[in-house]
Structures are given as C-alpha cells and as structure tokens.
Amino acid sequence: MPMFDSLLRFKAEKESQLFIKNCIAFDTPRLENEVFPSECGTEMDVVYKDGSKPLKLDVYTPSGCTGAKECFILIHGGAFVYGFKKLDQNFGMHLAIKAGIPVVNVDYTLMPESDLPQIITEIFEAMNFVYTKYGFETFHTVGDSAGGYLAYMVAVAARDSNVAQGMLVSVSPKGTVESAGLICPGIRNTLKSFPGIYFENLSGSKDDRQRLPDYAYDLNLIAKKDSDLRVAVITGEDDFLLPQDREFKDNVPGAVYYEANNDGDLKMHHVFPIAHPEWPQSVKAIELIADNAVGRR
C-alpha cells in the first residue's frame, strides 16, 4: 500500500476508534435502562450463517401475528465499524407491534474485517435464511444511520441484479423487497476518509482491486433508479446528517419524509427513534415507516 494510502488509513483508524468510544459511552446507559414492550414475542440469537464467528438474527413477532409472509429486515447503524442488533431491539419491537408483522433484526460483519460487498451479501443471506425457515417472501428493509444506507442499498440491489453485480454481491436474494425505511441515513461517503475508506477490499495490487461504482459513495446517484420502491426518510432537527437527508428525499420519487422538530428537552438528535422509540416524534416516525411498508400498496 503506498505511503499516502497508509496515512489515510491511519487517520481513518483514529477516527474510527474515537467514534466507537463515543458510541459506547452513549449506548451503554441507554441499553441498561430500556424497557421492552410486552405485546411482542422474541426469538433471539438465531444463527443464520455458521463459521468461526457465526452471524445471528432476532425475530420479533407482534402478539396475534401468525403465518406472516412478510417481514422487516432491520439493519443497525454504527458507521459500518460499530454496533450489534441489541442496539435496535426496542425500536424493532415497537415497529413490529405498529406494523403488525415480524421484524428480523440482523447482525453482520463489521468493517474493516469486512467490506461493503460482504455486508450486503450477508444481509441477503439472512433474507434467504428467513425465507426458507419462516416463509417470509416479502421484505421491507429498515435501518438507521449506516444501517439506513444499507437498507436502501440492499433494497435496490435486491430489486436490480445490475446494481447487485456492480456492488460485487455474490448471493441472489429470494423473495421481493417492497419498501425501505431510512432513519437518519448516511447518504454520501468518500473513498479516502472514514468510513468510506473501508468500503472496498484493499488487498492485492492497486491494479487488481475491483472498484465499486460511484453510487456506492453517493446514493443520490441511484435515487431515481427504482421509482416503484416505496421509501420513507426520517430525520430530525439536530441530526448532523439532516442536509444530506433533505437532498436525498428530493431525489427519491414519491418518498415519504418526516423531519422531526425539537420539543423542549426532547432533542431530535441523530437516530432519535432508535434511542427513544417512546418519544411522540419517534412514535410518528415508526408509524410512517410501518405505513410505508404495509399501508401504501
């Protein structure tokens, strides 16, 4: 790796470590104090991919829901380098209750141990697993921050084999994806800074590396590609990605958009519906994502 690339990688590593430290400081007390809704059953830590580090998923099923043929695929955020499905469990259970269908909460291999094609492939593998095990044939992707990016990219790639091929995805998904719910999504990244620097596999010589298309680094470039995909974009007044999300929703035909305003001590920070699904603004966001999935057919 050339010295300049090594310096960029070193800088990204420092940014990644600081980001993870800040996330842990925010998430640890939050998780310790969460109270989960009782109207939802859970099936936890189901292995969907064996290996030295098995990948697992949870299934949250609202009371009275039997024989469902559709579900949400919930993808946690964390700038692709941090996170785990537990972070989104409370939100996922609230979403399942509101929508009346199961939510499948998926773990995936974090960067830099993985790259973007591997993560998308793993989510496809999770979809294929629940297609076979539970009979889910219709999917609605949903995710926050980096998970919002993945929710959109997974949905478009699942519906368009050319996009999947461009993203170097090695698995064909079963079933169909009808909608994508994006919570404070990351839309634009760069190849030379965190976290985009981890998107591609840097092994091998520079000439032999397979490059990802430009739209991997800016979802606006494929936003008009699939006008039939139902998209909901959620953001908030204090979301640092607010400008990106405003631009993105303007590029998505027919997108449902909700920009939550602060209300006294309730500050609409980045991924507020994940951290506080009981807030009135979060309840509205969950309702919009649920309706975008099951109510806009």
Image (spheres, rainbow, N blue to C red):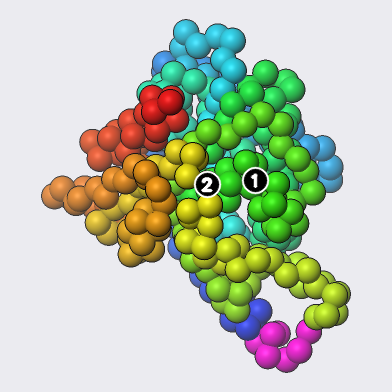
Q: Is most of the magenta stretch helix, strand or loop?
A: helix
**Circle 1 sits in a helix, a strand or a loop, which is it?**
loop
Q: Give the range drawn in magenta.
A: 1-7
Q: What residue type is labelled 2?
A: Asp
Judge from the rendering whether residue 257 lies leftward or rightward of residue 178; answer left or right: left
The dot on residue 72 is: none
Name which residue lies at 55% across and 9% down: 66
Disc 2 crowd rating (10 Å Cα; few below 14, some 14-19, many 20+) is: some
In the image, residue 33 lies at what x, y percent?
A: 39, 38
Total marks placed:
2
Q: Distance between the residues labelled 2 and 1?
A: 9 Å
**Residue 250 seen anywhere in this rendered image of the structure:** yes
Q: Quadrant of the N terminus?
A: bottom right
Name which residue lies at 66% across and 79% down: 9
Q: Which residue lies furthest to the left in this view?
A: 264
In the image, residue 228 lies at what x, y percent?
A: 49, 39
Name which residue lies at 40% across and 33% down: 292
Query: Up-down: is 9 above or below 29?
Result: below
Residue tagged by mark 2? 226
Check whether the beta carbons of the residues at disc 2 and disc 1 lie within 8 A of each other.
yes
Picture quadrant where residue 251 is located? bottom left
In the image, residue 116 lies at what x, y percent?
A: 67, 58
Name which residue lies at 58% across and 51% down: 153
Q: Which amino acid does label 1 sit on?
A: Asp
Residue tagged by mark 1? 160
**Circle 2 sits in a helix, a strand or a loop, which is it?**
loop
Picture quadrant where residue 283 is located? top left
The one of 159 and 146 positioned closer to us in this rendering: 159
In the image, residue 58 lies at what x, y percent?
A: 60, 30
